[in-house]
Image (cartoon, helix red, strand yellow):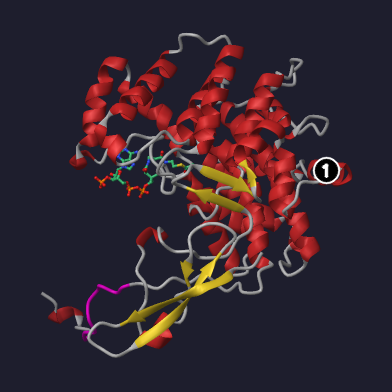
Amino acid sequence: MPTTPKGSLTVTLDGTNRTTTLPLLGGTIGPEVADIRRLYSDLGVFTYDIGYGGTAATESRITYIDGDEGILLYRGYPIEQLAENSNFLEVSYLLLYGELPNAAQMAEFTHGVTNHTMLHEQIRRFFEGFRRDAHPMAVMCGVVGALSAFYHENLDTSDPRQREIAAFRLIAKVPTIAAWAYKYRVGQPLMYPRNDLGYAENFLYMLNAVPTEPWKSNPVLSKAMDLIMILHADHEQNASTSTVRLIGSTGANPYAAVAGGIAALWGPAHGGANEAVLKMLAEIGTPENIPDFIAQVKDKGSHTKLMGFGHRVYKNFDPRAKIMKETCHAVLAELGIKNDPTLAMAMEMERIALEDDYFVSRKLYPNVDFYSGIILKAMGIPTEMFTVLFAVARTVGWVSQWKEMIEDPAQRIGRPRQIYTGEAPRDYAPLDTRG
Ligand code: ACO
């Protein structure tokens, strides 16, 4: 559904008679948006919005978030329904194509993805070029970006079929790259993908299996991993998705764009938060230290954040966190973890923060990463792999958003403006005249 006109907004430059009328646009749901594209030509004025908190940079039909109501929809379907009834590959199809697949479409899509799970053998050699202690996100950025060096014949982004093949390749290969980044780090043999396993199950297999032992799938853990992937699959125009769109808007190939998305996701304010939660809990050490830590968080001078709390958009609750919290308990029960000290600390932290006026008044609630970090730790996934796993799940979102952008006739290169606060024009002074 295209945007619909919803009236207009008249802007007058104070102290002048210069006025412009800006169209107000509405989407299917959500707030109206002032189309400010004429503001500069009509009034010579830019808008200023650090962090883009009040700026819509694109139309999109993929994901909808209502931060006040705690609503997250993929293509109109509530995340709660998808989490309960769907699976990651079906959600991937939905995000990419806009509708849930029928049985034939699902079979074809599954075949399309599994057909591309292997990596070129030359890529295998890349891993040896990294230090063993390299962070796996560094390896992900490098290897995913390098995929473009292997598929020269499919880099024409104006060709829909080539775009589709690139989408399949990315969704299929990121779990293999991620698992190999981990295996290389711990010095174990790289495990080749198994196309008879489900997407999340195969990822767990490549992470955990070794050639010398039979590997047994645990359906509860595979389901939990699949759920984590569904919940992380897309999230509207967040920092990493906007990075992918910005890179893609230049005509760069999708492998380069997704490598940029991975880099953006790495930061602790974004996807790196799940790893940061565990680091924070380790640093706090024991529950007696929690009050001191909370006091430090509240002290503005300390610049300490309670990791896993707060969200740019969700100012009430994060619906993904709600689902994740339930799964957290299911996973811990399955694994027989009753008195895990890290978990006990996390729960105590959650309790204190939810009662403390600092957090309540700022509408800071646990976000998805608070619980996903705890689940992943319980599943035995090493901390440094948390953000990598997020990147694996988010790849389908990045690819869907990139594809939507390329197919949008209104698409143009992303190019924000600025308020220049540097020096006014001045003359060059020769070196010997400078004091
Ligand atoms: N701990 C302590 N104080 C916080 C936190 C936090 N985690 N988050 C926000 N605040 C405070 C801010 O200092 C600010 O206080 P002030 O009004 O007194 O200045 C107020 O709450 C508003 O916060 P903003 O900085 O305006 O929130 P913003 O939307 O810019 O930031 C963000 C959102 C980056 C997620 C932030 O909450 C944060 O850094 N959280 C911790 C990291 C984290 O968990 N990130 C994961 C996000 S979810 C995801 O990427 C999947």
Q: Residue at x 62, y 57 (%)?
A: 401
How far from the left and from the top, in percent, is residue 275? Answer: 46, 33
Image coordinates of residue 33 in percent, x first then y, are 48, 67
Quarter of the N terminus within the rendering: bottom right
Please give the name of the residue rendered at 57% of the width and 61% of the height, measured from the top-left corner.
245
Residue located 63% across and 58% down the image: 61
- Please, what is the three-letter code of the amino acid marked with disc 1? Met
Q: In this rendering, does residue 131 appear at all? A: no
**Image quadrant assignment for residue 152:** bottom right
Considering depth in this image, is 306 or 423 the residue closer to the camera? Answer: 306
Above or below: residue 113 compared with residue 254: above
How far across and down, in percent of the image, does residue 374 sit? 49, 24
Task: Specify the principal SS of the magenta part.
Answer: loop
Residue receiving disc 1: 106
Q: Residue 435 in magenta?
A: no
- Say whether mark 1 is within 8 Å of ligand 1: no
Q: What element carries label 1?
A: helix
Q: Where is residue 145 in the image (x, y as percent from the top left)?
A: 61, 53
Give the extent of the magenta segment.
419-427
- Residue 256 visible in rendering: yes
Q: Quadrant of ligand 1?
A: top left
Q: In this view, which residue lies farthest toward the left? A: 435
119 shown above or below 14? above
